[in-house]
Image: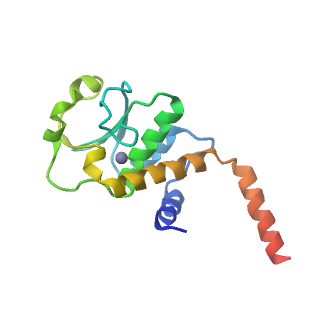
């Protein structure tokens, strides 16, 4: 098992993955685990002009007391993948942890993109270019694992496990 898969399993033990899959329920659990609210903010797919995460339409905005995930997928599945990718950055500890880089987002119309949320107290805006390719790769791999796990038929998975168990201990 590679390191990322091991980390994913460890996280899945402490933050239960809802079944059937429910994005807001999972995000709420992650927020509780981190002790910081997470707001989801839907945006136009082109709003970030391809500078966001993954395929270019996701963004993590860290504010003083909460986090905002912007997502601009073309389909509901794509939105889930983007949100899972940003959660991956959060749970894998990819926050920049240094002095704020909020000014780097000067080219993004954040106030217009999040009219329902105040754009005050932004500490950092994390885009693809802020992470480096390893972290981008890990966040995407986390999102893939989460999405696959979320879609797994649970009952079948446990039946396979118990069949395996019986076969080994017969
Ligand atoms: Zn990313």
Residue at image coords 81%, 77%: 169
Is residue 166 visible in this depiction of the protein? yes
Total numbered circles: 0
State whether residue 170 is above or below residue 100: below
Which x, y percent locates residue 115? 27, 22
Image quadrant holding the C terminus, namely bottom right
Query: Within the image, what quadrant is residue 82 found in?
Result: top left
State whether residue 80 is above or below residue 31: above
Task: Judge by depth and name the residue closer to the eye, 21 or 60.
Answer: 60
Specify whether 26 is left or right of 87: right
Task: Judge by depth and name the residue closer to the eye, 133 or 102.
Answer: 133
Specify whether 53 is left or right of 157: left
Residue at image coords 38%, 45%: 86
Which x, y percent locates residue 142? 47, 53
Is residue 33 visible in this depiction of the protein? no
Which x, y percent locates residue 64? 21, 44
Task: Judge by depth and name the residue closer to the eye, 43 or 47.
Answer: 47
Which x, y percent locates residue 78? 49, 35
Residue at image coords 38%, 58%: 92
Specify whether 17 is left or right of 136: right
Image quadrant holding the N terminus, namely bottom right
Colour scheme of the rendered structure: rainbow
State whether residue 66 is above or below residue 70: below
Query: Within the image, what quadrant is residue 138 found in?
Result: bottom left
Specify whether 74 is left or right of 120: right
In the picture as drawn, the residue positioned furthest to the bottom comes out as 169
Residue at image coords 69%, 50%: 154
């Amino acid at each position: 098992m590679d390191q990322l898969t091991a980390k994913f399993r460890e996280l899945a033990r402490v933050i239960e993955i809802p079944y059937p899959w429910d994005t807001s329920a999972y995000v709420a659990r992650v927020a509780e685990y981190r002790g910081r609210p997470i707001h989801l903010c839907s945006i136009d797919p082109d709003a970030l002009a391809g500078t966001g995460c993954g395929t270019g339409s996701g963004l993590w905005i860290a504010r003083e007391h909460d986090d905002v995930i912007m997502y601009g997928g073309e389909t509901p599945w794509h939105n889930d993948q983007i949100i899972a990718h940003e959660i991956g950055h959060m749970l894998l500890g990819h926050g920049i942890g240094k002095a704020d880089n909020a000014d780097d987002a000067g080219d993004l119309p954040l106030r217009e993109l999040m009219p329902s949320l105040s754009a005050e107290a932004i500490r950092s805006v994390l885009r693809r270019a802020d992470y480096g390719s390893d972290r981008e790769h890990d966040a995407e791999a986390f999102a893939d694992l989460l999405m696959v796990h979320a879609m797994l038929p649970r009952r079948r998975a446990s039946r396979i496990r118990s069949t395996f168990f019986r076969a080994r201990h017969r």
